[in-house]
Image: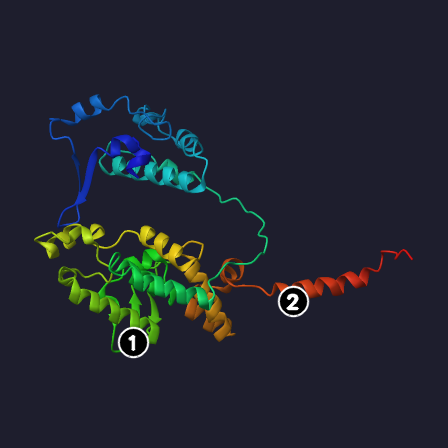
Amino acid sequence: MAYTLIGRKRASKLKFYDDDKGHGHILRKDQNLRSWNEFWANNKNEKIADCVYDSALGHSFIEEVNTGRCKMFVNKHSTLSGKRMARHTISVVITWAIDKGLFGENPPANPCLNILVNKKVKGNVRRKNQKFSHDELVRIWKACDKFVDKYPFQTSAIKLLSVTSLRKAEALKLKWSMINPVDKMIELPESVTKIDAEQDIDINDHIQFVLDEIKALQKKYTWSKFLPWLFPSFRVKHKNTRPHFSKKFPHKSHLQDIRNCWDEVKLEAQVTGKINRTKKTHHNLSHNVVSDPYDLIAMTRHTNTKVLEASYLEHDYDKRKKNSQLLDKQFNLIKVKG
């Protein structure tokens, strides 16, 4: 949000963190600057066209802020995600200003409430949804075993993603407190899941194998036992107050991404595609096991089968081609030249 508000260049010169009470703080990285006025004076030329600070909206007086000006700034962004972030950023700032009384005793309604960012509806063409074959999964696991010393915890994350319905962002936020060994389940709180609802994943033999592998890594890297995450970050390896650091900077003490590890694993395993292809593989294998749509929803953690059919499940294209040939014979319009 800071990038949209003041621009990427200015935001890179600031440090953002939360204290023990969860209150947000902002510090200037350049300790030679004595005040915020000096900061803005030194960075006045770091202009970016798509940030609020350098736009006409940012130069407006409070009484001039209305739905039209906010909508004009939102529509400057070309992508759907950019428009949504712009609307959210403006809304947060205006809400803060209203709470602080900057709009007077009778503040207006937040003008962003009337701004709709509609997603363009595009026709979906059903083609093959790429998934990993069994041989490719075997090669991926072998590659993970090869790079386990170079990328500890990251290789285990890839293995866990390959045998579960977890998204990458969900997996990297897993805590040991979410593992229920009695009921053999991974209990996902609403703060972790994409749909903001509590969900469960049953622990089978493959998932248990990965969990045991992570516990073995904990014995090798003892510093990781101080952290609550299944996939801790090596950036806290040399921190002397690890529990305090994890509490104060929770988002910095677990893995943020596994991109570099996945790139090397792909090269070694001779496969292509993004890591989210493991999720499509899991869903297609689940579809082979269960035919009932409600059982499939429970295994894949999707709220309905519409998304599964459109984006995840593989379709029988050979059957479609055969049906096309049968339909072709029904027309019988082409005269055979003899």
Residue indicated by mark 2: 319
Residue at position x 30%, y 31% from top?
7
Q: Residue furthest right?
A: 338
Above or below residue 165? Residue 183 is below
Q: Element under label 1?
A: loop
Residue 315 point in image, percent of width and height? 57, 64
In the rendered image of this protein, does residue 124 appear above or below residue 220?
Answer: above
Q: Spatial distance from mark 1 to mark 2, Cα to Cα? A: 40 Å
Q: Which residue is mark 1?
A: 184
Q: Is residue 99 visible?
A: yes
Q: Position of residue 272 (x, y in %)?
A: 45, 55
The colour scheme used to paint the residues is rainbow
Identify which amino acid the numbered label 1 is placed on.
Lys
Q: Quadrant of residue 100?
A: top left
Residue 68 rendering spot, x and y as whole percentages? 43, 30
Quarter of image, res 196: bottom left
Q: Is residue 307 above or below residue 16?
A: below
- In depth, the one of 270 and 247 nearer the eye is 270
Q: Is residue 91 left or right of residue 33?
A: right
